[in-house]
Image (cartoon, coloured by chain):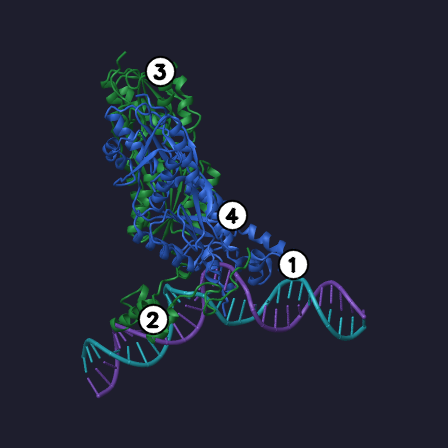
Chain colours: A blue, B green, C purple, D cyan
Amino acid sequence: MTNSGTSTATTKRGRGEKSSATIYDIAKLAGVNPSTVSRALSKPGRVSAKTQKIIEDAAAELNYQVNPFARALPTGRTQTIGLIVADITNPTFFDIIRGAETTGSARDYTLVLAESAESPETEMTAARRLLSTVDGLILASPRMDDDHIRALAADKPVAVINREVQGVPCVVPDVNKGISEAVRSLAGHGHTKVAYVAGPKQSWMTSRRWDGVKSACEWSKLSSVRLESSKPTVDGGRQVARDVLESGATAVITYNDLLAIGLMQELQAGGMRVPDQISIVGFDDIFGADFTTPALTTVRSPLGECGNRAVTILLDMLQGHDGPRQAVTVETELVVRGSSGRLLS
Amino acid sequence: MTNSGTSTATTKRGRGEKSSATIYDIAKLAGVNPSTVSRALSKPGRVSAKTQKIIEDAAAELNYQVNPFARALPTGRTQTIGLIVADITNPTFFDIIRGAETTGSARDYTLVLAESAESPETEMTAARRLLSTVDGLILASPRMDDDHIRALAADKPVAVINREVQGVPCVVPDVNKGISEAVRSLAGHGHTKVAYVAGPKQSWMTSRRWDGVKSACEWSKLSSVRLESSKPTVDGGRQVARDVLESGATAVITYNDLLAIGLMQELQAGGMRVPDQISIVGFDDIFGADFTTPALTTVRSPLGECGNRAVTILLDMLQGHDGPRQAVTVETELVVRGSSGRLLS
DNA sequence: CAATTTTTGGCAACCGGTTGACAAAATAGC
DNA sequence: GCTATTTTGTCAACCGGTTGCCAAAAATTG
């Protein structure tokens, strides 16, 4: 039925767009059927070596590039992966994006980025929209609930970073290792009371980290207290400074680095000497964590590896392998800088 | 790639993929021809009001979502924009990305992100690859040469941020305004010699900023000297500290904030008091610029607006309007923080 | 009321690939 | 040399939309 091999090369194709070579052009140049060209380009081996060479040479001569839409239509595949992050300007996601992009590129996949702006509704909308054009989806610190995530995973392969969801492959930093190191370090410096400044209420990682802090303090026989913050930002850290002082804690572990930085700035502005009078430990080791004076001690999450592993899992699933049954964990580690140390008064 | 789509879901449509409604399903339910459905959905008005309603109701009942590949094939349109940045983890690009994404979303476009890793070759490869799937492309601080950029623009609409390219629409911060404010401020504080720490040699903006610094210093009768850095990073700033001291300058303007931050850290580690003994001014007001002690004085580029304007220009071009003949400029402004001030010794 | 014009929905070709089915050509086995 | 099997290229239907062309129906005009 389709007999477009008769239409001329340079006009009327791709209506209104600049024309470029198609498999029909290659077929004409190589003297074979377009289906043979398609097979040669997407299933080498199904075509003889001699024919394969003729077609490859013709494709090179015509500077042929496959039209991804035309290929996606019959196959449903687009060689793209979607990645949704909670906040595109939150540096926690930089290395996740970087790791995902690097691994995807290595396997000829393009990354499409979107953000949820911390809203479960916006996140779901973005996810549904992306799912129609990508092969698989990664959700980094997703805000929607587990059922919604599983519903998405029923459509196409989904991987989650920074949260465990039953039935969906996940990559999660093992926060307990880094927290244990942090608490051990603080105990060794003579601290006896640790405050934990929490993150967003709907964040799975907020309570995970609090659980880790509590457990580690119990182990090291330190007392611990949880303080709420209004938002996981520098400003949120500033706002919680009074609560921290009133808590009587001499060491603070925050939900993320931004809170730690804001807290440090506010305490220093009030005359507190860090770490002489209070030690501060952040989380994630984000970009800018070492800009402060003193530089921030923090629990580093290997976020690049999170991105890397999530993409690897996704692409394996796209190739027919089952996703891992249990969450893949990556290790955190304490990065000691100047903001934590021995109490001097 | 392996053919994992061997299992069928419910019917033989979308081979191997989960089926969903198409215009053929709507046509059957509404009792009209598929072409009528297509017209109703993409050209309301070309169909009678009565038929339009029947079709819209049927589409809603079937939870119909247009397949973007199928639509892209005959029209060449995908409702996506590509954005290539030089370094995805360089905070200069965060607000560009944010501004672009926000404006794109508002007009129903998806943003596809890629990076050039500061390499003209990688950038060209990414650009060629993106151009086959997006409607238009934005290059932020591109590293490829002008001819290559114009070649891309010959294929599809292209807009450039942070650089002027003849024949291609550009959005460029007017660095001279911010630089003039910075130099005026330094002159007012009694400084007489300003060092400029340059950025990447192939960066168009490097020399633009140097020209601005030179001119502003001449105007204010300050002497100026240009120092090279090995890379536009915190480490690059550290490495140039000795050169800065040897130059005898009492004020420094750097190519970007990262250089300023590294420089400040190294000078402070060597016992210099900022700003009492040397003033430091950065550029762009990136994320983390106010983490330092003292917080960094910097020339803010309205990067979000750059992203915003570039998308607006691109989408206007996609709707048939000509791009602006001259570069669109956005104003920079000096943000005075603690790292610049009066000399005290 | 008839002729003319406009509106509207259907037909089918097309976008650029993929792929099952088929038959011709090539190869292997007896 | 003949038969059976395998290899290989072609045919054409398909993926899910779009749209030029056409004719029937509806509306308008004289």
Q: Chain of mark 3?
A: B
- The residue where tag 2 is placed is B36
Closer to the observer: label 3 or label 1?
Answer: 3
Q: Amino acid at mark 2?
A: Thr
Q: Dot 3 lies on which element?
A: loop
The residue that mark 4 highlights is A107
Q: CA distance from mark 3 to mark 1?
A: 73 Å
Chain ID of residue with mark 1? A
Q: CA distance from mark 1 to mark 4?
A: 26 Å
Q: Quadrant of the N terminus of chain B?
A: bottom right
Per the rendering, the mark at residue A48 is 1
Question: Circle 3: is it few (<14), some (14-19), or many (20+) Cα within 10 Å?
Answer: few
How many discs appear?
4
**How much space separates mark 2 and mark 4, taking CA atoms?**
41 Å
Marks 1 and 2 close (CB-CB < 8 Å): no
- Dot 4, how many residues are within 10 Å of its Cα: few (below 14), some (14-19), or many (20+)? few
Q: Give the residue furthest to the top.
A: B345
- In x, y percent, where is residue B230? 44, 25
- Whether residue B173 appears in this view of the structure is yes
Q: Which residue is mark 3?
A: B271
Q: Position of residue A10 (x, y in %)?
A: 47, 56
Q: Is residue A182 above or below residue A163?
A: above
Cβ atoms under marks 1 and 4 closer than 8 Å: no
Residue type at mark 1: give it: Ser
Q: Chain of mark 2?
A: B
